[in-house]
Image (cartoon, rainbow, N blue to C red):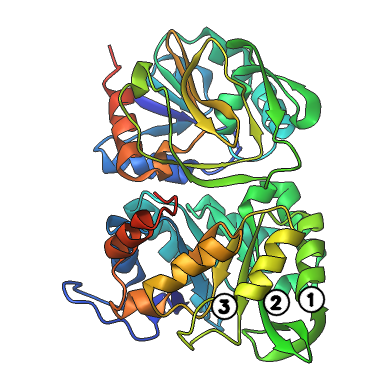
Amino acid sequence: MKLTIINYGAGNVFSVKSAFQRLGIEPTLSNDLNEIRSSDLVVFPGVGHAETAMSQLKESGLDLLIPDLKQPVLGVCLGMQMMCESSEEGDVKGLNIFESVRVKRFDDELKVPHMGWNEILETKGILNGLIDPVYFIHSYFAPINEYTIAETNYPTAFSAAMEKVNFIGCQFHPEKSGEVGEEILKRFLSLRK
Amino acid sequence: MDIKDGRTVKGINFEGLIDAGDPVSLAKYYSENGADELVFLDITATLEGRKTMVEMVRKVAREINIPFTVGGGISSVEDAFNLLNNGADKISVNSSAIKNPSLIKDLSNRFGNQCVVLAIDAKFIDAKWIVFQAGGRIQTDLDLFEWAKEGVNLGAGEILFTSMDNDGTKSGFAIDPLYKLAKCVNVPIIASGGCGKVEHFKEVFEQTNVDAALAASVFHFGEIEIPALKNYLKTNNIDIR
């Protein structure tokens, strides 16, 4: 099986890579379009600022490639946010995979970043049946929408995860979410055709 | 966990650990026993030792599946990059940020404020909480609350506050300054210093609006077992993982 973690200079790919290694998979790190296109599974991570990350994607042509992928794609944190229509962070346009979903900043009344372990609710799709807390660390969020497959309250509900055909996005970090995180990554691996 | 030259220091007394001084084995032990997050503080003085820290971070990231923060001696964006790139989730700064507050800004601009923890050590002197640097050895003229606010304005995404008056006493967390701190900044706060028994965790979560509580020796010496602590907090209706 070939699993590629898109390595476009935004964030901590080492932890994501290690998480798959613990499951016995040796991921490839790459921003090469052919390499990514020929993978069985693709992980799209991201930590940092949406505007910077988007321009890094554009530089390598990944902004056009990613929405076109047909194999299972897992976006994590900022990766998930960039799969949306737009983000208030830097007012950037996203990849618009999750159409019409606009990423917003948490209300200033709240403690921001939203950081720590929170339950996921109303889980379906790839997260069906999972209820244990997962680890979040973010200041921007996607509201509940037609693609939402898990909700978390902070204090109002937002999308903890979304799914559309072959695209999955997690706002939380499965690679840092203990056993339940491992279960999610295993389920992702099992999507390979 | 305090780390010196790649080894955990301060007494650690576990049965069933092959090498109790190895931070990687300990990290694994704690993450398997229900810790929600780990903090490693490098107290190494030499440059050689710093390289060991990067190696340790890499090994820890390979082994554990919970978040961890690394602090101690981080004085540049490059230092932070090396640690984050090897799997640390957050960077904690203390003395280096006091000497050069713009470091907080540089780090948060580069990595996002969710990556930047401002660690503050303070002591109650003449009715004021005064910040100390260099591991509590040098008194500054900074006020805890003012410094915390400035740090957050500069881009710190979390505050790790250690009360030097409570640290090592096992008499409980410093409720009063933690209560005030949670009122004056709008980022998550980790309470540290003074934990001696499970009731102290309950107290700090019930009486202040902190987001996390940190302890070291009670865990290292097996005086509190994490699963038992979590059960206790759950039965007392404190919302935890």
- What amino acid type is highlighted by mark number 2? Ser
Q: Position of residue B140 (x, y in %)?
A: 79, 85
Comparing labels 3 and 1, the label whose residue is closer to the camera:
1
- What amino acid type is highlighted by mark number 1? Lys
Identify the element where label 3 is drawn: helix
* Distance from Cα at disc 3 to Cα at disc 1: 19 Å
Q: Which residue is mark 2?
A: B95
Toward the viewer: A6 or B65? B65
Q: Chain of mark 1?
A: B
* Distance from Cα at disc 3 to Cα at disc 2: 17 Å
Q: Position of residue B2 (x, y in %)?
A: 46, 77
Question: Relative to residue A105, is residue B238 drawn left or right?
Answer: left
The answer to whether A58 is drawn above or below residue B169 in the figure is: above
Question: Relative to residue A137, is residue B93 drawn left or right?
Answer: right
- What amino acid type is highlighted by mark number 3? Leu
Q: Which residue is mark 1?
A: B99
At label 2, counting other C-alpha atoms closer than 10 Å, the crowd grade (few under 14, some 14-19, many 20 or more) is many
Residue at image point 40% right, 32% down: A28
Toward the viewer: B24 or A38? B24
The dot on residue B121 is none
Question: Relative to residue B226, is residue A158 drawn left or right?
Answer: right
**CB-based contact (under 8 Å), mark 1 and mark 2:** yes
